[in-house]
Image (cartoon, rainbow, N blue to C red):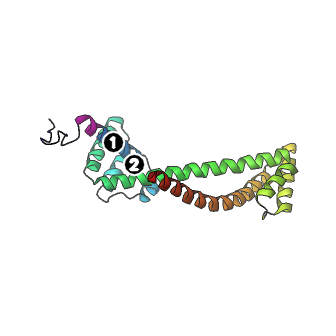
Amino acid sequence: MRGRDEDTGEFLSPSRSQQRREALEVLELAEKLASLTPTQLAKLPIPGDLLPHLEHTRKITAHIARKRQLAFLAKQMRREDDEALEAIRDALDEDGKAARREVAAMHRVEDWRERLVAEGDAALAELLEEHPAADRQHLRQLVRNAHEEKLRNKPPRAYRELFRELRTLLLAGSDADAGDDAVDADDDEADARED
């Protein structure tokens, strides 16, 4: 049973429900870590004493044995500092955000490619307006070749090359924008905290 401070009446320790929620959060984190590849794990700030337990958990495939091993891994993780677990969570969140940004960028490139092949010079003019440094003639030739390939049901050689060119063009510009957006987001968060 939890004790209370006689002077203030506040509880001295977290409730059982709170302790259970925290334990379940650590178990969920353990499940995420066990599902990662060794390359992904190497990028995370995982304490050295947890690595053997993680490796052992990853090797177990039988359902009940894996569940039991995950519980053991979570128990070992709860013995770590809160800062260590937060560092792992933060690193996992960053990886997730980076992956979502990368997928969104690829979708943007695919959308431009589809527009260029479907709309032709009108879409190309709009793209060149946004990216004046692009090679107009090369892009126009790729768009025409991709359009011809599509009409004649030929292998999509120019279509793929157009994707590569657009990816280089759009992602080179978006990397600079992403850095600006990150600075703007940090400024917005700082302003929100001040208010």
Q: Quadrant of the N terminus?
A: top left
Question: What SS does tag 2 mark?
Answer: helix
Q: Amino acid at mark 1?
A: Leu
Residue 17 in the magenta stretch? The answer is yes
Q: Amino acid at mark 2?
A: Leu
> Which residue was labeled with disc 2?
33
Circle 1: is it few (<14), some (14-19), or many (20+) Cα within 10 Å?
many
The quadrant in which residue 151 appears is top right
Q: Is residue 128 above or below residue 117?
A: below
Q: Identify whether 83 is placed above or below 60.
A: below
Prevailing SS of the magenta stretch: helix
Q: Of the numbered discs in the image, which one, if any, rests on residue 27?
A: 1
Number of marks in picture: 2
User: x and y percent of residue 110 in the render?
Assistant: 71, 48
Secondary structure type for disc 1: helix
Task: Answer whether residue 95 is magenta in the image.
Answer: no
Q: Position of residue 2 (x, y in %)?
A: 16, 37
Residue drawn at x 63%, y 62% is 176
